[in-house]
Image (cartoon, rainbow, N blue to C red):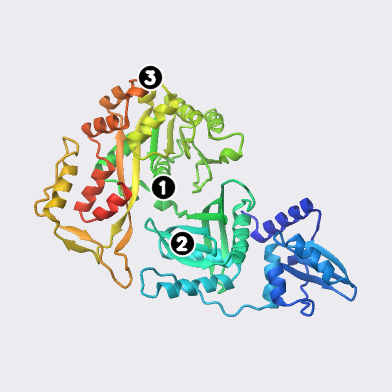
């Protein structure tokens, strides 16, 4: 079980005190006495200090990581008749003292909603609430709201005058609140401690939070997040991705695969070796797809090992190895070589990022292992050309990769509010042009009397969309594609590979999107927004 977060914070503060050469006090283990005559509450709050012990000749102040040296020097000058001492205390300990000096009023957490006429009022009220509660409560509240809104990400973005808080719902970001830079320093410190990242690192970092938070109302919120931080002009930005750890959701039946797509995946799963790549941008569902395949393959007869940065879902029966990427001398490629010596049947590499990892994964796929991985590329064909560039001329390349799945997420129309309309001839002509490029053996839908749909609106759903649907293309290694891949890389283009794959039966993401538009699942604007 994970250690109590407060204990972890106190241990971290104690280590920090040793580095700084300053005394340390664990405020959770001492009786707290208030000395209201020494300084005002606002001074204590602004200067990030609190008196721990006071008598006629001594004052012992508790300071935090963010208390400045200038403040400490000025206090020595201000209290010249007393002996001044300083001890480092945790941010949580400081906040406990502040609550004693200024007990919080009753906190009312307002549920966030979007698209209403009073959006600006809601933004203001939520901002005021976040300013008035503890840093841990800010995180717990935002996660709760994100869950309720069925959101995927929480963005904390440093701007010149405030920190903008946005939540991504169905692929679109919505402003929620703005908080001050002073408050954000507390929130960032809380996030950094929980995610085990540094607030002062010069580079981007990745962490993970999996713990319970208790709000001021007494309500407990479970927080499962992947945390990404990056320094910007005005401070450290944070993006937190929410994860659902319920294994029943990691199921191929819940991915929305059509019969043709499911048959291709099932055929690959039956093979004891080869490589499967899932490609797409961040937030397109690549990891969920891979974990669903892993969950299907997870039987007592198979040894499954994953290399991940970080481990996002915890799966019983699977050996999961965290990789710290560039921060660890043993990156994906070196750890993959070590893993292959453990005789796995299935290996999942969280992401192929470099040539060394690509070559090692290819070799593993050729030597009796089923290798699953993600890759950043704009399409399945583009992934193959990029992989070929990384690996170079390799006659076995075409034999190693069995399936490349590219996907994007578009918003799904709310069936209860969507509005029907009849497209004009110009739009029908545009659709026919795309449908004419479908694979030769695939039946074209009749669009002569076509009805399309646009998003409607209701009080509960002002945007007219509900959930998301994946647009996919599945690049299967046909004979024609294999022949192209055996040519020198400089002679093979992405367009050539895609054209051959379509000729051999592949539907592109644009094809899939148009077919879903015709079926009334989404809109043409959504498909063009996401696929292009």
Q: Which residue is pictured at 68% across the width and 56% down the height?
A: 8
Q: Note whether residue 317 is visible.
A: yes
- Residue 4 falls in image quadrant: bottom right
Report how far apart the C-alphas of labels 3 and 1 lie in the structure: 32 Å
> Which residue was labeled with disc 1?
288
Q: Nearer the viewer, residue 184 or 485?
A: 184
Counting labels gives 3
Labels 2 and 3: the sequence-earlier one: 2
Report how far apart the C-alphas of labels 2 and 3 lie in the structure: 48 Å
- The residue carrying pointer 3 sits among few (fewer than 14), some (14 to 19) or many (20 or more) residues within 10 Å by Cα, namely few
Which element is circle 2 on? strand
Q: Nearer the viewer, residue 484 or 236?
A: 236
Image location of residue 24, percent across then percent down: 79, 59
Q: Which residue is pictured at 61% across the width and 69% down the height?
A: 134
- The residue carrying pointer 2 sits among few (fewer than 14), some (14 to 19) or many (20 or more) residues within 10 Å by Cα, namely many
Labels 2 and 1: the sequence-earlier one: 2
Report how far apart the C-alphas of labels 2 and 1 lie in the structure: 23 Å
Q: Which residue is pictured at 44% across the width and 24% down the height?
A: 367
> Which residue was labeled with disc 2?
166
> Which residue was labeled with disc 3?
395
Image location of residue 130, percent across then percent down: 55, 70
Q: In the rendered view, does 365 fall on the left or right side of 9? A: left
Image location of residue 323, percent across then percent down: 56, 40
Q: Nearer the viewer, mark 2 or mark 1?
A: 2
Q: Which residue is pictured at 82% across the width and 71% down the height?
A: 78
- Residue 386 falls in image quadrant: top left
Q: Are marks 3 and 1 in contact (CB under 8 Å)?
A: no
Q: In the rendered view, does 251 fall on the left or right side of 333? A: left
- Residue 496 falls in image quadrant: top left
């Amino acid at each position: 079980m994970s250690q109590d977060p407060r204990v972890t914070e106190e241990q971290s503060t104690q280590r920090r005190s040793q580095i700084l050469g300053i005394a340390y006090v664990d405020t959770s283990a001492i009786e707290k006495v208030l000395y209201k005559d020494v300084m005002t509450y606002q001074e204590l709050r602004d200067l990030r200090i609190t008196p721990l012990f006071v008598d006629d000749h001594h004052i012992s102040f508790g300071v935090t990581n963010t208390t400045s040296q200038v403040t400490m020097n000025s206090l020595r000058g201000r209290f010249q008749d007393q002996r001044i001492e300083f001890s480092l205390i945790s941010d949580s300990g400081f906040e406990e003292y502040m609550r004693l000096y200024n007990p919080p009023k009753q906190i009312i957490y307002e549920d966030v909603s979007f698209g209403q006429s009073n959006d600006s009022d809601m933004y203001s009220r939520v901002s005021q609430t976040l300013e008035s509660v503890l840093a841990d409560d800010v995180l717990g509240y935002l996660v709760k709201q994100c869950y309720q809104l069925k959101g995927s990400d929480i963005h904390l973005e440093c701007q010149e005058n405030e920190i903008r808080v946005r939540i991504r719902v169905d692929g679109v970001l919505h402003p929620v609140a703005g908080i001050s830079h002073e408050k954000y320093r507390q929130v960032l410190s809380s996030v950094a401690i929980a995610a085990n990242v540094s607030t002062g690192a010069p580079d981007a970092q990745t962490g993970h939070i999996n713990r319970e938070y208790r709000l001021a109302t007494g309500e407990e919120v479970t927080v499962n997040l992947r945390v990404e931080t990056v320094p910007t002009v005005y401070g450290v930005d944070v993006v937190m991705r929410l994860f659902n750890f319920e294994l029943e959701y990691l199921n191929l039946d819940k991915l929305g695969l059509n019969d043709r797509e499911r048959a291709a995946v099932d055929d690959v799963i039956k093979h004891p070796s080869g490589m499967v790549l899932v490609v797409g941008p961040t937030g397109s569902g690549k990891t969920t797809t891979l974990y669903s395949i892993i969950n299907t393959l997870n039987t007592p007869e198979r040894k499954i090992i994953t290399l991940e940065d970080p481990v996002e879902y915890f799966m019983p029966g699977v050996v999961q190895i965290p990789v710290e990427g560039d921060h660890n001398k043993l990156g994906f490629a070196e750890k993959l070589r070590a893993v292959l010596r453990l005789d796995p049947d299935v290996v999942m590499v969280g992401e192929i990022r470099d040539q060394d990892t690509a070559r090692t994964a290819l070799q593993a796929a050729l030597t009796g292992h089923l290798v699953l991985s993600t890759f950043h590329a704009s399409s399945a064909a583009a992934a193959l050309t990029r992989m070929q560039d990384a690996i170079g001329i390799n006659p076995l390349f075409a034999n190693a990769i069995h399936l490349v799945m590219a996907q994007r997420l578009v918003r799904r129309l709310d069936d209860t509010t969507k509005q029907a309309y009849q497209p004009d001839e110009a739009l029908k002509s545009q659709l026919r042009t795309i449908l004419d490029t479908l694979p030769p053996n695939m039946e074209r839908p009749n669009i002569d009397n076509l009805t399309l749909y646009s998003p409607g609106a209701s009080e509960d759903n002002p945007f007219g969309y509900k959930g998301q649907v994946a647009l996919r293309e599945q690049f299967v290694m046909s004979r024609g594609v294999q022949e192209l891949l055996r040519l020198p890389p400089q002679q093979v283009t992405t367009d050539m590979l895609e054209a051959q794959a379509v000729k051999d039966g592949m539907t592109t993401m644009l094809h899939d999107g148009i077919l879903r538009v015709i079926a009334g699942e989404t809109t043409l604007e959504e498909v063009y927004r996401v696929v292009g």
